Amino acid sequence: MKWSAANKCSLNVCCSEYGFCGTTKDFCGNKTIESPSCSGSSASKRTIGYYESWGITRKCDKMYPESIPLGLYTHLNFAFAFIDPASFKVAPMDSGDVVLYKRFTGLKNLYPGLQTWISIGGWSMNDPDQPTATTFSDLASSESAQKKFFESLLSFLETYGFDGVDFDWEYPVAEERSGKAADYKNYTSFLKNLRNALASSGHTYGLTITIPSSYWYMQHFDIVEIEKTIDWFNIMSYDLHGTWDNTNKYLGPYINAHTNLTEINLAMELLWRNKIDPDHVVLGLGFYGRSFTLADPSCNTPGCIFSAGGNAGSCTGSVGTLSYSEIKSVIDKDEAKVSLDKKAAVKMVTWGENQWVSYDDEETLKLKLDYANNHCLGGTMVWAVSTDDSEGTASAALSKLTGRSTIALSAK
């Protein structure tokens, strides 16, 4: 069989003689990818924490801006703001978010040097049943819409004291996510125009975007051109697996850890194939777990079949997801069995008759931080600060690993 380094496949992945794109040996033969290599602590340069505004609506373990652990994070991103589909002005995701903005940016008064950013978008903004489903596409394709948006954004940043903007478009081009074919080029042009607009303000506003870890979605980002415009990429190296695998013909209803480092490495290789500067890459970490209900309680290792998402937690109330606090509660109160997969850099817990969850703690966060440092990455980011427990345990663990000052919890 003949192999090629494919000039027809997106992201410079390999093409088999049959014309299919991929990165495994079946596609690439014996070709290997040269990954960046470092010694030191490059990943301690930036630690970014995303704050979920809806964290205040939970039944328990609510987290207000004043409860965010300070000392670890160099940047905090408020998730999320939306874009009004009619006016193209920045709009709150929820009307109650407006009163939180200045409380959030006011954290800079408690911890000098901290930057507070607004993150625009998120998964639900592009849901097909939402009025904002095509708003990103509409904005990126229209200069007049962009003019309205830029004016609104600059006013928003100045009014509330934000230091930068992070774009989380999930996802351009992808039809199932309300995308359009023109998004590939339009998003790149839009970001260039946005950078110019930010520069014209007289402020040094930052600009980043989030990118997926799967080839399926990442192929629709012109990462080579976009890198020239933004400050860095926040790669969502979590949610690699979940209940949605059940409807994916390539995956199926099998339990797998959603922050598996071996799979994360494959995602990073997509960046190295395109000569992305590792200093412009921030590795995503999860302060939560993806849980499953086992189809057969006696089969509880990765690759076993699940019948549904795991039972909802008492605070988050979300099937298939548990916060760090809820996982700690399971371990402390239930007859839980905890195991470590060192190669995947994840912990796994089984409890009850049929419950399973994967998550990260200090031990596995260290393995991931070591990976980030060994590959010269420019930082880590956390989804989400607001899924930590009330003592800031996960943040404290990461703080210890990055060598930053002791976590100081601000007034609640």
Image (cartoon, rainbow, N blue to C red):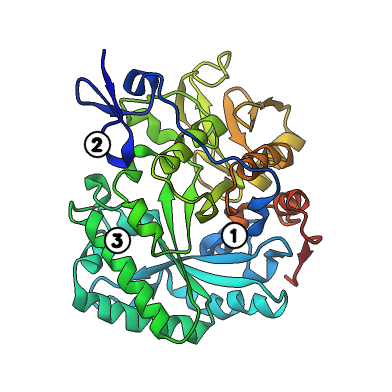
The residue closer to the viewer here, 85 or 147, is: 147
| Front of the two marks 2 and 3 | 2
Rounded to the nearest angstrom, the CA distance separating label 1 from label 2 is 35 Å
**N-terminal label among 3 and 1:** 1
Check disc 1 and report the residue beneath it: 48
Residue occupying the point 57% across, 72% down: 116
In this orientation, does residue 210 appear?
Answer: yes
Answer few, some or many: residues within 10 Å of disc 1's Cα (few below 14, many 20 plus, some between 14 and 19): many
Q: Mark 3 is on which residue type?
A: Thr
As drawn, the label of residue 188 is 3
Asked if residue 187 lies left or right of residue 78, the reply is: left
| Front of the two marks 1 and 2 | 2
Residue occupying the point 43% across, 82% down: 156
**N-terminal label among 1 and 2:** 2
Asked if residue 303 lies left or right of residue 46, the reply is: left
Check disc 2 and report the residue beneath it: 7
| Residue 125: quarter of image | bottom left
Relative image position of residue 133 (x, y in whole percent)? 26, 59
In this orientation, does residue 170 appear?
Answer: no
User: Where 272 sits versus 110, above or below?
Assistant: above
The residue closer to the viewer here, 274 or 302, is: 274
Residue occupying the point 69% across, 66% down: 67
Rounded to the nearest angstrom, the CA distance separating label 3 from label 1 is 24 Å
On-image quarter of the C terminus: bottom right
Relative image position of residue 286 (x, y in whole percent)? 58, 46
Asked if residue 403 lies left or right of residue 259, the reply is: right
User: Where 383 sits versus 141, above or below?
Assistant: above
Rounded to the nearest angstrom, the CA distance separating label 2 from label 3 is 21 Å
Q: Secondary structure at mark 3?
A: helix
User: Where 342 sits versus 78, above or below?
Assistant: above
Q: Mark 1 is on which residue type?
A: Ile
